[in-house]
Amino acid sequence: MFLDASGSAPMTNRTLEAFHAGLADGWADPARLHTESRRARQLLDASREAIAEALGARPEHTHLAHSPHAGLERATAGIFAARRGRDRIVASAVERDATMHAAHHVAAGDLTMVPVDARGHVDLDAFAAELAVPDVALAAVQHANHEIGTVQRLDRVAEATTAARVPLLVDATASIGHGPAPQHWDALVANPADWGGPAGLGIVALRPHTRWLPAWPEGDDWAPGGVLVPAVLAAAVALQERREVLDETSLRLHRMIARVRDAAAGWPGVDVVGDPDERLPHVLTFSCLYVDGEALLSRLDREGVAVGSGSACTTSTLEPSRVLAAVGALSHGNVRLGLHPGVTDADIDRLLDLLPRVIADLRDEAGAPEIA
Amino acid sequence: MTGDDAAAGSGGHVTVDATGMLCPLPIIELAKAARGLAAGTEVTVIATDVAARVDVPAWARMTGNEFVGEKKTDGAGMALTVRLR
């Protein structure tokens, strides 16, 4: 069973069929002038319009990028370039690496990270205080965190950015397709793979008033070389499919995560992270004292259970998740769950049966002390 | 690799050398060293694994002990101290 769907959810049959139909009908280069290309162009435009509508954005201000990572980079660079004379970026401490790296790069290191509380909510007073200094080009605050699930209070965040007249970049790559789209943003980035569309595509929506300049050589082209038209079609169909049953799915997954949260909180030496209420319906992370995260993932994988982790030993840099560090959570023995709509109560039963045994086994093997 | 955790000083201070160990080993060694020690004893973990900076304070919170602070060491590592309760 696949419980690591945050960021890359399995595609449904309907989405796969749309992808295949897109390959059959939308294979031509949409930039050319013949009939085949016009058909591809129509598919591309209709798909982008559908995605824009779901985001509450205008199609003409909705851009496609080669990945959510590239979308975050280009949105950051493009907006920054239009804010001459203001050269600092303010971001919450739990933004994605893509946002942090882009901000660090374009602002030449002039990046201020605003701390979050133990549940992952950005410190609004500290955030407003940073914006009060008139050198801020851009503020970046995510809608919801992809690791711990905490949803930011964007209405309050936007009050501060509006008062300071600073554009607000909202990373919604973990939230679109799982609940209502956020309303408070000047630029929004979404990830189709997170809602069950294909990987290799990012969406950037801008408000009509949001100024940007091409900080790259290709002018107003946000995806040089073009995007895969069938992927955009499949992304639009996948989002449509999610939205048709959004409330029901969201409620069901929210309850499943609540079950795991409650159970895990009762296991000895387990640190359950994030806001229990103001959160994504389908995401949960918790850390297990004295457990090696990599061993835990491997053991679960051998049992046919796929989960994620933010522990240092599971990352390419051997550094623990910056998000776990920012909220003061235990970083080793970390388990990250991302449920997709196909997960059943029986899957959760099995997980809750398996996990305490695996955790206890690994502690025994490591010679860990008893937990009082 | 177990450090000098047996060498409790007269001031109630124990040092655990977890240099070179990766998570979760520094925390396991910390917990082993802390077992049976009197309340008020300070335990310092010397670690090179960056995760220890996050995990020693988290361990203290989860086990009802108190994180005192972090200092740099002469070498590449850091010294993280907790006070037992």
Image (cartoon, coloured by chain):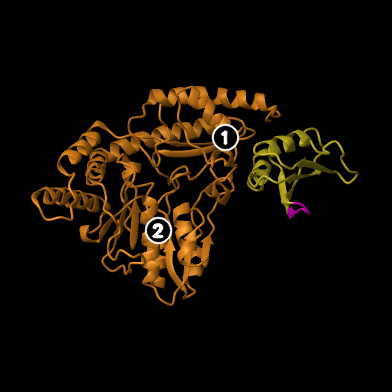
Q: In terms of sequence position, does the residue under pointer 1 or pointer 2 come before the other?
A: 2
Dot 1: chain letter: A
Image point 58% across, 42% down: which residue?
A312
Foreground disc of the pair 1, 2: 2
**What segment carries the magenta color?**
B71-75
**CB atoms at circles 1 and 2 under 8 Å apart?**
no
The kind of residue on which mark 2 rests is: Glu
Which numbered marker is on residue A73? 2
Q: Residue lying farthest bottom?
A: A85
Q: Residue A348 vs residue A242: left or right?
A: right
The relative height of residue A55 versus residue A282 in the rendered view (above or below) is: below
Dot 2: chain letter: A
Could you tell me which quadrant the N terminus of chain A lies in?
Answer: top left
Could you tell me which quadrant the C terminus of chain A lies in?
Answer: top right
- Secondary element type, mark 1: helix
Q: Residue A283 vs residue A239: left or right?
A: right
> What is chain A's hue in the picture?
orange
Q: Residue lying farthest left?
A: A35
In this view, the residue in front, A272 or A190, is A190
Q: Residue lying farthest right?
A: B10
